[in-house]
Image (cartoon, helix red, strand yellow):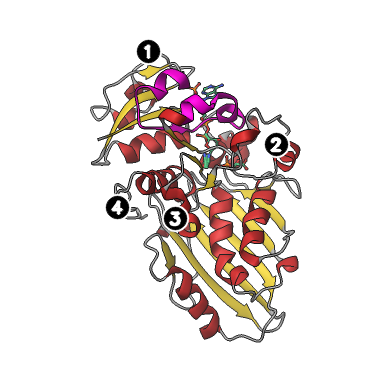
Amino acid sequence: MIKVGIIGATGYAGGELVRILSAHKDVEIKWYGSRSYIDEKYARVYQNMFQIVDDVCMDDNMAELADQVDVIFTATPQGLCGSLVNEEILSKVKIIDLSADFRIKDVKTYEQWYGIEHKSPQFIGEAVYGLCEINREDVKSARLVANPGCYTTCSILTAYPLAKEGVIDMHTLIVDAKSGTSGAGRGAKVPNLYCEVNENIKAYGVATHRHTPEIEEQLGYAAGEDVVISFTPHLVPMNRGILVTEYATLKKNVTEEQIKAIYDKYYSDEKFVRVLDGGICPETKWVEGSNYVDINFKIDPRTNRVVMMGAMDNLVKGAAGQAVQNMNLMFGLKESEGLELVPMFP
Ligand SMILES: NC(=O)C1=CN([C@@H]2O[C@H](COP(=O)(O)OP(=O)(O)OC[C@H]3O[C@@H](n4cnc5c(N)ncnc54)[C@H](OP(=O)(O)O)[C@@H]3O)[C@@H](O)[C@H]2O)C=CC1
Ligand SMILES: CC(=O)N[C@@H](CCC(=O)OP(=O)(O)O)C(=O)O
């Protein structure tokens, strides 16, 4: 059995990790980390785990944890994992960080967009960006995985094949994204109160959202050039789900059949990426509770643009599911172990 510790087990991403890992046949959760609920039963924090998890929450201590488990998930605010990790810990245990601390290779870019000083830049180079469909081989041998962000996973996977094949002009890429409110975490914040979110939709982080450089960096690797995008997230009144709509000018005269063939080239063997049949637009409801990303596209001949669409569950493929997918790869397990979650509907 793989022994697991979760720092930040009481947050939304940590809670989803507990939900998925408690049903994973090769895993034993040893540590439910928390600051606010120390010594309280985990199932009192999340009653859905009543009679499923009997353990209590424990104070977070990464050094102590490293002696007790095989892998640590950090589902904690930005900056925390970077402030805890050190060589001794990494020599004992694998770390999968759900925050952004190790996602961006240029430390100055990270510090500029996140407004915090990086406490362990020496590990950024070795951290593997854990987008399994793209970096699978590197993940297998990693000791530190930077689990991608929720908007970024959906935005990158949706555009990746066309960026990689040089079909779209990357200078024209616009990413319009919508997220359910669980994306903002469990902590109380006025903009996320029921009356502020319900019956409402709002853009935020316009031209400044911290996921912009992460998407640019990864799509830049795919395209083989520097990429600058416009990225606008929106908060929508639903619990889970991300929908991205991306627009880019076509560089080549291509048909829908040719674009479909490109998507199939990259994704037909990918269990968790479903390229939908022609004319079907992805919807968040069709992926809810699952590790799937649904993708489709449409060429608009009037504007010579392609419109790419992607939908996924921010807490599953956008966080905990992808983290477990990474863990499976790091421990040589079947990549989909514990993740064969059928989407719920309605
Ligand atoms: N929500 C989402 O859809 C996604 C989130 N993520 C990332 O996952 C991480 C967690 O996000 P999310 O679950 O939404 O956030 P939450 O606010 O819901 O949870 C934060 C968790 O971190 C713990 N925590 C907070 N501060 C500290 C600290 N100083 N030391 C130790 N633990 C601390 C909290 O513990 P307690 O409450 O017990 O004090 C809680 O368990 C973030 O980095 C986020 O960016 C990534 C992808 C998607
Ligand atoms: C709706 C909402 O507030 N979403 C969050 C992103 C959630 C996320 O998980 O981003 P990371 O993985 O980088 O932490 C935001 O806009 O900051």
Q: Residue 59, image x and y in percent?
A: 44, 16
Distance of mark 2 from mark 1, alpha carbons? Answer: 32 Å
Q: Quadrant of the C terminus?
A: bottom left
Q: Give the amino acid type for the residue marked by disc 2 in the picture.
A: Tyr
Q: Which of 235 and 91 is in front in this view?
A: 91
In front: mark 3 or mark 1?
3
- As helix, strand or loop, the secondary structure at mark 1 comes to loop
- Region in magenta: 61-90
User: Which residue is labeled 4 in the image?
Assistant: 334
Would you call the spot at circle 3 few (<14 residues within 10 Å), some (14-19), or many (20 or more)?
few
| For residue 106, above or below residue 221 | above
**Residue 256 seen by the camera:** yes
| For residue 220, above or below residue 92 | below
The tag earlier along the polypeptide, 4 or 1, is: 1
Contact? badges 4 and 3 (CB < 8 Å)? no
Distance of mark 4 from mark 1, alpha carbons? Answer: 34 Å
User: Which residue is labeled 1 in the image?
Assistant: 39
Disc number placed over residue 114 in the picture, else none: 2
- Residue drawn at point x = 46 percent, y = 59 percent: 133
Residue 323, located in which quarter of the rendered image?
A: top left
Q: Residue 79, image x and y in percent?
A: 62, 30
Distance of mark 4 from mark 3, alpha carbons? Answer: 14 Å
Contact? badges 4 and 1 (CB < 8 Å)? no
User: Which residue is labeled 3 in the image?
Assistant: 137
Q: How many marks?
A: 4
Q: Give the amino acid type for the residue marked by disc 3 in the picture.
A: Glu
- As helix, strand or loop, the secondary structure at mark 2 comes to helix
Contact? badges 2 and 4 (CB < 8 Å)? no
Contact? badges 3 and 2 (CB < 8 Å)? no
